Amino acid sequence: MTDHPRIPLAGVIGSPIAHSRSPALHGYWLKHYGIKGHYIPMDVARDDLETVLRTLPKAGFVGCNVTIPHKEAALALADVVSDRAALIGAANTLIFRPDGKIHADNTDGYGFIANLRDGATGWQPNAGPAAVIGAGGAARAIVASLLEVGCPEVRIANRTRARAENLRTEFGARVVVYDWVQAGNMLEGAATVVNTSSLGMDGKAEFRVPLDALSPSAVVTDIVYTPLRTHLLQEAEAMGCATVDGLGMLLHQAVPGFERWFGQRPEVTQELRDAVLRA
């Protein structure tokens, strides 16, 4: 359980934040494991972030998640930074240590890989190149994790080529950049295909990258989970591909933080997925 003298508190900081499913996710685990703790959403403006982060430990908070637009700023404010957060250049999980210092971590890459392994039995990162659509903050974590687990080549296409070039500069020769108009071509021979962009999300532009070159043996995943079965996943499944939805990444990335804050390693289960989908 937990040895905190006060009821431990955690939460998620962002702006906006009302849409977040993290409170439902952590709330399920707290109830399931019988932990006397709370996890709350906090809408915090950019200018107030440092003040809030320095104050929360005094109110009994043991840590928090950080989401858009605060991931980079939270990293800069941290006293201690994990290697993976430093590599990615952003933090999504903060631990408030007993000595008062803020420890920053990034669990997005962990969540991405854990979701792939959970959702696509037998997935092998070294089976062939990975094709990544998008080069934003989520892509940084995903590219870093794919390279770390042994993917031989990571191909990236982004509407703004310069952002993809930046990833190649930072992550090295195994990253290959494609022009946006050639995004469909980079799927040829790819063993893993990932949409890290907002294309296909409810309220966003449609996903229109042509899938003609997609191999039926590829594993295809989309970090978008609203809708749960995106156009990309539907089309890939129709072509015979194994597909993995984006909700699992959200669930798995939450595991390390919950364990650090509340002293219990939680499990990602179908019951958890159902509870978060109902939220």
Image (cartoon, helix red, strand yellow):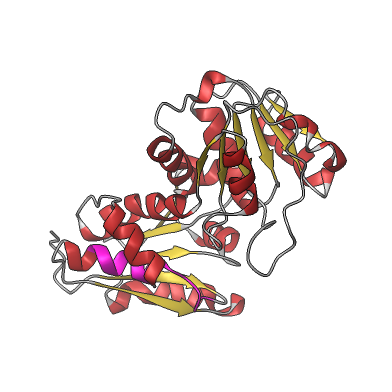
Q: Quadrant of the C terminus?
A: bottom left
Q: Which residues are magenta?
A: 17-29
Q: Pick the residue in front: 163 or 279.
A: 279
**Residue placed at 54% from the left, 44% from the top?**
86
Give how far across and how far down residue 22 sits, in percent.
40, 66
**3 left or right of 235 in image:** left
Q: Quadrant of residue 104?
A: bottom left
Q: Is residue 25 magenta?
A: yes
Q: Pick the residue in front: 105 or 218.
A: 218
**Residue placed at 31% from the left, 76% from the top?**
58
- Whether 129 is drawn above or below 75: the answer is above
How would you classify the magenta stretch by its main secondary structure?
Answer: helix
- Res. 151 in view: yes
Give how far across and how far down residue 252 sits, in percent.
38, 49
- Whether 90 is drawn above or below 48: the answer is above
**Residue placed at 67% from the left, 58% from the top?**
200
**Residue placed at 83% from the left, 44% from the top?**
162
Give how far across and how far down residue 84 sits, in percent.
49, 41
Q: Quadrant of residue 35?
A: bottom left
Q: Quadrant of the N terminus?
A: bottom left
